[in-house]
Amino acid sequence: MLSSPSVRDATVDDAPGIARVHTRTWQRAYDHIFPTARLAGLVEEHRAEQWREWLSDPEQRMHTLVVDKDGTIVGFAHVGPTRDPESNEDLVGELYAVYVLPEEWGGGIGRALMAEVLVRLRADGFREAILWVLEDNPRTRRYYELAGWHFDGGAKEESVLDIPVRQVRYRISLEHA
């Protein structure tokens, strides 16, 4: 029987690995939404610097979690208080990001990260959590639904990589998750 991937808190030294996962996953998961040239233009070094900054001075009740395999980061999740203006930041947490290298999809890394995300959000006193996902992202939406999240009717339009996109909001009760 295979063991479950081990999830741990990220350190500043993990920033390049997180940036690599972040960039490579975007390039694969969103290739049907964004032009290839825009995705190819994502620069890991810029994202690594951003992650170094976030990891060196994390906000209260914010967690960045990673899974590494043989010393290489293969997945990460980032959670904390909601940024949604319609939600109470004292009671509602938010899953800002969860990404797994495409070659690792289906291997349990996403499930392990999601399980720890829910543990951390509950431990921080949140009663429920939200996340935003691109509406035209059926694979990821199925992943969230299988993990117990549900579309709550919220939607917003944004510009990502200079492309207008629609995001939809999912929600989960942490009391029953």
Image (cartoon, grey):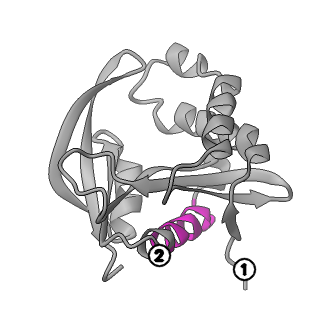
Q: Characterize the local packing of mark 2: few (<14), some (14-19) or many (20 or more) Cα atoms within 10 angstroms.
A: few
Tell me residue 149's x, y (percent).
31, 65
87 relative to 136 in the view: left or right: left
Q: Which sits earlier in the primary sequence, circle 1 or circle 2? A: 1
Q: Quadrant of residue 127?
A: bottom left
Q: In the rendered structure, which segment of residues is drawn in magenta? A: 106-119
- Please state which of residues 101 and 56 is positioned toward the viewer in this rendering: 56
Q: Is residue 110 magenta?
A: yes
Give the residue at mark 1.
3
Residue nearest the viewer, comparing 43 with 10: 10
Q: Residue at x 48, y 29 (%)?
A: 31
Residue at left offset 71%, top offset 71%: 6
- In the picture as drawn, the residue positioned furthest to the right comes out as 70
**Which x, y percent locates residue 57?**
62, 44
**Which image quarter is the N terminus in?**
bottom right
Amino acid carrying mark 1 in the image:
Ser
- Quadrant location of the C terminus? bottom left
Which quarter of the picture shows residue 175? Answer: bottom left
Mark 1: give few (<14), some (14-19) or many (20+) Cα within 10 Å.
few
